[in-house]
Image (spheres, helix red, strand yellow):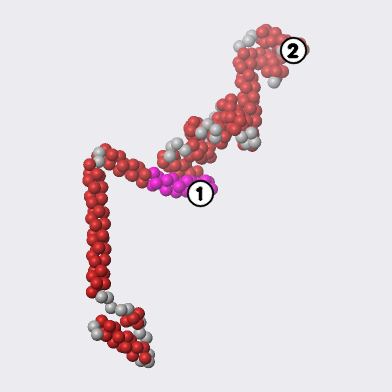
Amino acid sequence: SGPRYLFAVAQQKATNLRAMPGINVVCHKEFSKPPLSKKGKQKKLEEKRAAAEAKAAKRAQEEEEEAAQAEAEAARNPAEREAEIAQAREEERRQADARRLQTAQKKAVRACSSNDWVHALALYTECIEIDEFDHLHWSNRAAVQNKLGRFEEMLEDATRCIELSPDFAKGWVRIGTANSALENYEAAEEGFHRALLLEPENTIAQEGLAAAKKAREEDAAEDAFDTLLRELKQLSLADLQVRALDEGIKKDRIAEAASRKNSKEAMVSLVTAHRY
């Protein structure tokens, strides 16, 4: 009687249903469980109540922690909050600049590849504006200045490049190239020499150094010729004859030059031709 009777009836109904064709009974397990007693129901109810209380307690604790965090945030020094906000904004700016810089660099490379030097100059200038402490931007713009024949500007950019990175050989090559174009041959030699100290096998520096040295020597010889010419023009004909003898010129050639209509000019030409 009671629960046992009901359980037996339920089992019989399940058996009858399974016997019916075309019907799949999915609740067999439920029927196979014995019904809970009054004590079991009470225990189940207590478990649910305990779970609900634990959930409520956890939520209350979370709300308490959130309130404490909000209170601490409100009590925090305003200067600290402003500093954190400023730091977050600065980080956003850096990330934006990094994206902008990457785009400008890619466009500059394409401009150089197509010999669009004016556009490349503008793009490398933009790179410098974004990050003025990267020596490569100054080096790249110096190379573009060279292509545009802006040698004074090239020297300025190359100088800034090696100020930022004294061990960057290409920067010293740029220094040498700019000074050579400006006919500052001693400074050019120094630039190429510094590059070779850093990269002994740098062929551009080797060739640049040799060319600068040759140009300097030719320039020096030309200056010496001009100096001699000015000096000789200030001498009298008699002094020119003495000077010609001192230079080792034969007397007959001196006499021939002195006998000409423009004897002084002839004597100057004789001395300079003998010297050079």
Percent across and percent down for residue 128 are: 44, 39
Quadrant containing the N terminus is: bottom left
Mark 1, residue position: 110
Looking at this view, is 169 or 58 the one in front? 58
Query: Percent from the top left, x then y, of residue 209?
Result: 62, 30
Residue identified by numbered label 2: 248
Which amino acid, mark 2? Gly
Residue 204, label in figure = none
Q: Quadrant of residue 191?
A: top right
Q: Is residue 103 left or right of residue 181?
A: left
Instruction: Report whether residue 51 is seen.
Output: yes
Q: Residue at x 38, y 47 (%)?
A: 96
Q: Taking the image as drawn, is residue 148 in sight?
A: no
Magenta run includes residue 113: yes
Which of the pair 235/68 is nearer the observer?
68
Number of residues whose C-alpha sits closer than 10 Å to that of mark 2, classed few (under 14), some (14–19) or many (20 or more): few
Magenta-drawn stretch, dominant element (helix, strand or loop): helix
